[in-house]
Image: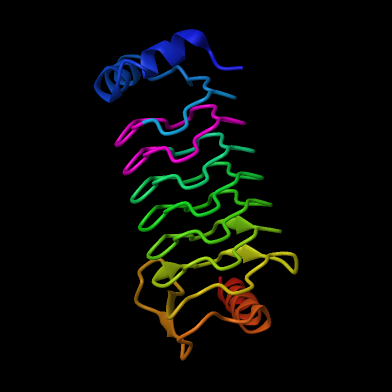
Amino acid sequence: MANEEHLSLLRQGRQAWNRWRIQNPSIHPDLSMAELSEFFLFGINLSHTNLAGAHLFKTNLLGANLKSADLRDTDLRDAELIGANLTRANLSWANLNWANLSKAKLIEANLNRADLSHTNLNKTDLSRAQALGTNFSSAELTGACIANLEIDSTTNLEGAIASCLFLDSSRQNHHPMAFNQALVQSDFNQFLQTMVESLVSRA
């Protein structure tokens, strides 16, 4: 359960919270299981925060720092995460259905078994993220960086849309696709698997 003191500080607003984080860098806040749906948390520092099981339905997290945050089994449906930093965050089993993660950083994030169906991942950096058994069905991935993205046979890409994918973190090597409609799982999954194996073999 969430630490009541930490919850109280959060409710004071972004400036008070971020100031407290700067003054207490060694404290890893506990907001687990907290009800934070539809909160306005734009630009907030939630790095290394325990948000496991928290309710963040329709929460505004634009530009938020969620680096190394624990977001296991978190409800992030319809959340606004444009430009958020989720590097090395644990999002396993999280529900991000219809969330907007455009231009977000998911570098080395744990997305195992997460639900990213209908999620906006356009221009998102998924470099070295782990997505075993992840549901990307009907997700938008145009312009996403998938360098060393780890998937497996249970990763669901049915209906995912991507007209262009970047294959390295420099975003110089890209794969323009001739698809103007939703991709069939077999084609997209085969391309990703081949790409990952190729990059691993060259490492």
Q: Name the spot of residue 151 as percent of width and height, x first.
A: 66, 65
In the image: residue 116, left or right of residue 23: right
- The span picked out in magenta is 40-65
Measuring from the top left, give residue 144's x and y in whole percent: 43, 67
For residue 39, which quarter of the picture?
Answer: top left
The secondary structure that most of the magenta stretch takes on is loop
Q: Quadrant of the N terminus?
A: top right
As for residue 74 lying within the magenta part, the answer is no
Q: Is residue 63 magenta?
A: yes
User: Which image quarter is the C terminus in?
Assistant: bottom right
Q: Is residue 131 shown above or below 186? A: above
Of residues 155 and 127, the one drawn nearer to the viewer in this rendering: 155
Q: Is residue 18 positioned above or below 5 on the image?
A: below
Residue at 46% in and 91% down: 178
Would residue 174 appear left or right of 157 to someone viewing this image? Answer: left
- Vertical position of residue 179 compared to residue 37: above or below: below
Residue at the image point whose x is 54% and y is 27% from the top: 50
Left-right relation of 91 to 40:
right
